[in-house]
Image (tube, helix red, strand yellow):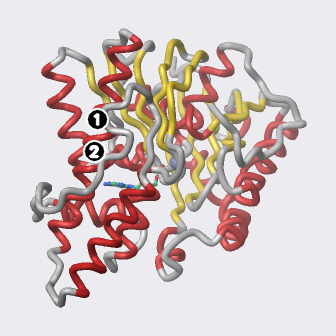
């Protein structure tokens, strides 16, 4: 009665993950082997090292996911895998593993767009959620507003022109001397800061479009830190963190609510690593409540990269007959 069992595989960046999801909505296992500790000393992901680590980890992680689900490969009905966007060498490891399993066991192969996967994490976290809705996808590599019209019908409303929101968090954290990844660090530090202490710019604010730009904000923070240092004054890192975070969240919130208005949607979903941000959640909770708009976000473990969201997306593709063939290849610049 659990429904179809889909094995999901995710290797697009720095987590090797495998998961078994039943009926598209129930997580039986979600194993995540993170390379974050390795990349902390480099201050960011080193693609070549990431690929090698994925090769070392992927089969063990898949075995563990099947084991924790209490099943064997013969019980699986389909294999879903992220084929883009992401680091090409990292993606190739997952794609090769998925193709091998699908070929050996004569199973449907389902190539999954990583961004769609992030959005679908909401279906795992909220069993009552159904399309249509507006999704704000905010991760280390992406900042996009998407109109999710149905399970297999998406319209990209707009995205960032330069840095992604998570990338801005990571870069600003780096110049503040905080460890990688910087998003959670800034989130924590900002709790003790004054968000109105420094008036950082809000790019493309109030414009009637759904594009974002965060590179100017990143430079503004850097300039501010340099100026304060030159004056020989001490910087309040909590104030800088809170003020920077407020600028990012103002823009994300405003454009998301504009998207709700334009699409006529009555539900908003957050997705991607930055969806774990406590201020972003709190702000959108209030703003959506005021407008009687439904607001959903996944728990932190389903916000950052994981294979359960990939298995979920794969399930709905399989239901619609949207299977891949064995020519499936990694597409680093894959779009929605
Ligand atoms: O989705 P994800 O795991 O990987 C990508 O697909 O990019 O997102 C990682 C990003 C990083 O930039 C990280 O700093 C950010 O998500 N992040 C956060 C928080 N937790 C993770 N950003 C702000 N606040 C957080 N609490
Ligand atoms: Zn991601």
Most foreground residue, 82 or 185: 185
Q: Which residue is mark 2?
A: 249
Cβ(mark 2) to ligand 1 < 8 Å?
Answer: no
Q: Which residue is mark 1?
A: 253
Ligand 1 falls in quadrant: bottom left
Q: Is residue 170 left or right of residue 7?
A: left
**Which residue corresponds to the image point at 18% horizontal and 15% vertical from the top-left?**
292
The quarter of the picture where the C terminus appears is: top right
Q: Is residue 254 left or right of residue 88?
A: left
- Residue 318 image label: none
Percent position (x, y) of residue 170? 41, 64
**Which residue corresponds to the image point at 26% horizontal and 79% vertical from the top-left?**
227
Cβ(mark 1) to ligand 1 < 8 Å?
Answer: no
Most foreground residue, 24 or 295: 295
Q: Quadrant of residue 284?
A: top left
SS for tag 1? helix
**Above or below for 206 versus 129:** below
Percent position (x, y) of residue 210? 44, 30
Seen from this angle, which residue lies furthest right? 327
SS for tag 2? helix
Q: Quadrant of residue 52?
A: bottom right
Q: Is residue 52 left or right of residue 228?
A: right
Q: Is any atom of residue 27 visible in this view?
A: no
Q: Is any atom of residue 318 visible in this view?
A: yes
Q: CA distance from mark 1 to mark 2?
A: 6 Å
Percent position (x, y) of residue 206? 31, 32
**Which residue corresponds to the image point at 88% horizontal and 35% vertical from the top-left?**
326
The total of numbered circles placed on residues is 2
**Above or below for 48 versus 217:** below
Q: Is residue 76 left or right of residue 175?
A: right
Pointers 1 and 2 in contact (C-beta within 8 Å): yes
Most foreground residue, 262 or 185: 262
């Amino acid at each position: 009665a659990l429904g179809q069992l889909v094995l999901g595989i995710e290797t697009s960046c720095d987590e090797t993950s495998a998961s078994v999801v039943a009926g598209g909505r129930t997580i039986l296992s979600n194993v995540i082997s993170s390379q974050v500790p390795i990349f902390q000393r480099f201050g960011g992901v080193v693609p070549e090292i990431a690929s090698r680590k994925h090769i070392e980890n992927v089969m063990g992680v898949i075995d563990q996911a099947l084991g924790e689900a209490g099943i064997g490969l013969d019980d699986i009905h389909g294999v879903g895998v992220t084929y883009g966007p992401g680091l090409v060498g990292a993606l190739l490891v997952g794609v090769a593993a998925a193709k091998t399993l699908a070929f050996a066991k004569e199973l449907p192969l389902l190539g999954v767009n990583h961004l769609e996967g992030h959005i679908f994490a909401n279906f795992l976290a909220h069993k009552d959620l159904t399309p249509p809705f507006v999704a704000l996808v905010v991760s280390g590599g992406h900042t996009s507003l998407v109109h999710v019209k149905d399970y297999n019908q998406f319209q990209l409303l707009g995205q960032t022109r330069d840095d992604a929101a998570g990338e801005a968090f990571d870069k600003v954290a780096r110049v503040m001397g905080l460890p990688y990844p910087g998003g959670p660090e800034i989130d924590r530090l900002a709790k003790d800061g004054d968000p109105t202490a420094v008036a950082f710019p809000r790019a493309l604010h109030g414009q009637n479009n759904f594009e974002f730009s965060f590179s100017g904000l990143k430079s503004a923070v850097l300039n501010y830190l340099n100026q304060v240092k030159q004056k020989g004054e001490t910087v309040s890192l909590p104030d800088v963190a809170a003020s920077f975070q407020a600028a990012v969240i103002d823009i994300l919130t405003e454009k998301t609510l504009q998207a709700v208005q334009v699409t006529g949607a009555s539900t908003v979903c957050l997705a991607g690593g930055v969806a774990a941000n406590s201020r972003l959640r709190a702000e959108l909770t209030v703003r959506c409540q005021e407008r009687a708009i439904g607001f959903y976000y996944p728990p932190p473990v389903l916000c950052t990269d994981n294979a359960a969201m990939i298995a979920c997306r794969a399930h709905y593709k399989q239901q619609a007959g949207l299977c891949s063939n064995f020519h499936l290849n990694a597409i680093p610049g894959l779009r929605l």
